[in-house]
Image (tube, helix red, strand yellow):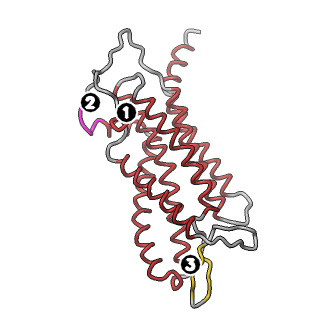
Amino acid sequence: MLDTVPLRSRFLDHADYYARWSGLAIGIVAAQRLVTMDSGDITMPLVFAITAFGLCAVGGVLLGDALTLRPQEAVRTASVAPRLVRDQVPPRMAPLLLLQAASLVTLLVIGAGTASSELDRMGRAGHVITVTCEGMPTPLGPWPGLYYSGPMFAALAIGTPVCVWALRRIAHGPGGDQQRRDRAWAITGAWGLLVSSQVLLVVLMIFVALTEKETCAGPLGAATIAVICPLGLLSLFTFVWSLVTVVAPRAVEDAAADDGPFDDE
């Protein structure tokens, strides 16, 4: 009986870590199941897999934050200065993630506007772009039209408000400055996984479509490839950073400490 109290305490102390890792593990398993499901389209299972992985990562981090123990102090003190969300999130990576989110929405809107509305033999519309190649209309795909962008928009519509709400709750909730920043960085990393993975998928779709028949893409297609390739490399970098931030909370603490001294009073 006496040994159960320390064991329970140790478990609760690291419950947020377990929840984060469990969310990633469940996301990987779900993505593996979805990507191998039977479908006449090889791209749609990949869209579902990436979306499910990002949402599971966000869910695991949010669950871990809910399980994080708050310090129990006899006397609580509060600073006169208001707490802002931007002071809790990573100062360098948060702008990059916001830029990627804006780029993702822009690409999805452009993809939806340029995708062909004609139904194919399987009754699908909005999954290819039709260009004129050697005087003949030629479909190029997969293209991030409404057929593919629907799940992505839904994931952003679900994950983004929840993460913003969690960040506001952390900024105005109890806990030390370092603990709040660690929790905020973890949530930022989870949202970064959701955004950067989808940007990578959209960039890959556009790249494959425009290079399927190089003579059909034309100068506009070449210019599009030149624009999206750096965005893809940036997304790969932020994806790795976000994954490390979620998996290894200690890296968050060290990085936060390097940004400058914080006042814990």
Disc 1 crowd rating (10 Å Cα; few below 14, some 14-19, many 20+) is many
Q: Which residue is mark 1?
A: 181
Which dot marks residue 212? Answer: 3
Q: Which residue is mark 2?
A: 262
Q: Position of residue 210 (x, y in %)?
A: 52, 76
The residue positioned 44% from the left and 72% from the top of the image is 224
Inspect the image, locate mark 2, and give the three-letter code of the amino acid beneath it: Phe
Q: Position of residue 129 (x, y in %)?
A: 59, 74
Q: Which residues are magenta?
A: 257-262
Q: Position of residue 74 (x, y in %)?
A: 38, 9
Q: CA distance from mark 3 to mark 2?
A: 52 Å
> Is residue 195 positioned above or below 120 on the image?
above
Q: Secondary structure at mark 1?
A: helix
Q: Secondary structure at mark 3?
A: helix
Of pointers 3 and 2, the one earlier in the residue sequence? 3
Inspect the image, locate mark 1, and give the three-letter code of the amino acid beneath it: Arg
